[in-house]
Amino acid sequence: MAGQTSVPAPSSRLQEIVSDSNRIEELSDTDNEYADEYEDVGTVVDQHEAANMAYINSMISPIRDSLETETSITQDETLAVVLPFLEGNPNDFLLNTFGLPKLQREKHAAFLHQALGDYPAQMAAMDAARPWLVYWSLQGLTALGYDISDMRDRIVETFLPSQHPDGGYGGGHGQLPHLAATYAAVLSLVMAGGTTAYESVNRKSMWHYLGRMKQVDGGFTMAPGGEEDIRGAFCALVVMSLLNIPLDLPPDAPARAHGMTTFLDKLGEWVSRCQTFEGGISAAPGNEAHGAYAFCGLGCLSIMGPPTETLNKYFDMPLLLHWLSSRQCSPEGGYNGRTNKLVDGCYSHWVGSCWPLVEAAVGKEVSNRSALARYILSAAQHKKGGLIDKPGKRADAYHTCYNLAGLSAAQHKNVYDEATAPDIGKSELGAPFGWKVDGLFEGERVWGDEDFVEEVHPIFVIPYQAAEDCRRYFEAKEGF
Ligand SMILES: [Zn+2]
């Protein structure tokens, strides 16, 4: 592997690292078998590799369960794949001042521009996901600092045919509306910005559509007659908050027949029931806790009101903190989504972006952001552009978007401050407009000045300015 000629291949060290014998002494021993070789290295690259190895050794748990299971074997196999990227630089990227690969901004942007282009015929099965491909690509580009305003007309034209006459968006023309497609379409249009984009959304039919999703137990379905899960609650509230849609249920909402009057009736209680015995958040009461649902649950409550109030009211925060912290893999530094699962770059956001919301509620910083950034820069950048789940996987717009969102949340201090945007957000579902970036995390910084991604709104996962402009537009508008 390039750049690793004087140090044994990291994967060959795996046996040493995963051995259950003599761990603490072995790792703290300066007289280890590689010490002489570290002294011999003369290049900056090899010094960086030695520093990376020392860091990784310091991150490895000294205690290992000796019981071998399918899970433990898969974890060891994953570590063998990931470690070379954390220790060295197999992609031959230029390094930043901290010895980690620089953010490959131009390559990632080229990848995302390509993702917005035409697709081969075999991708037709993905047509229902078209709004997502647009959202992930646009959000990734804005996070990388690219102006997307020249695509505004194209974005509006893309979504006009996929808006259903009865409200909401489907994947494309003629498809039934779905709350996931609606969420991605609305976020894309809000990012595009401007009157034409805003007015392309039929907010009145959207209000009626969302009213049909509201369930009598407090939650939301993803589609009429579809599954009820926490994505539904989160997506509905994101759309309502950005578009300033009335909180009262429309007259034709089926839940009204059961005595409900607003979209928030029983919602906090329903979200609360999604917290599992582990402390994490599941798709629906009784299911397994999962990183993406944790973000949806935290986001939903943070739209309902200030996180200082809603999170502490509806979640057992110490238990949630324990579960969220346990999602950070060591020594990988990235997150997994569930107990006993593998590190995956998309959880850089789904779990990593939970931290600003949680920290606003508990009042202190509690996450290891530099370890996450290490994973993203070292292991989650594809050599040819785009970001990935883990080394060996293909890049896609989804992992590109969410790795970058996680990196933004690791670099920027997103804080809740009700005085932030005094001219908007004072009415219904306005809490998300009380967030701002209050400087940068400097602690154990591992990113160079050229590795910054833009500020990303911690709940809407689009640029702050785009969210605020849209809300301001609809707050100023009378009626629908
Ligand atoms: Zn993933």
Image: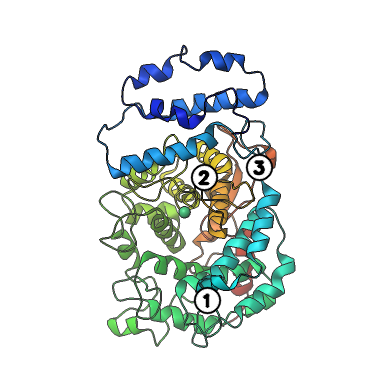
Query: Marks 1 and 3, Cα distance to the nearest angstrom?
Result: 34 Å
Residue 319 % position (x, y):
31, 46
In the picture, the disc for residue 391 is: 2
Which residue was labeled with disc 3? 451
Q: Secondary structure at mark 2?
A: loop
Answer whether residue 5 is visible to the viewer in this image: yes
In the picture, the disc for residue 171 is: 1
Earlier residue among tags 1 and 3: 1
Q: Nearer the viewer, residue 411 or 251?
A: 411
**Is the residue 318 above or below the residue 272 in the image?**
above
Name the quarter where the N terminus is drawn. top right
Earlier residue among tags 3 and 2: 2
Query: What is the image's colouring?
Result: rainbow
Q: Secondary structure at mark 1?
A: loop
Amino acid marked by disc 1: Gly
Amino acid marked by disc 3: Asp
Amino acid marked by disc 2: Pro
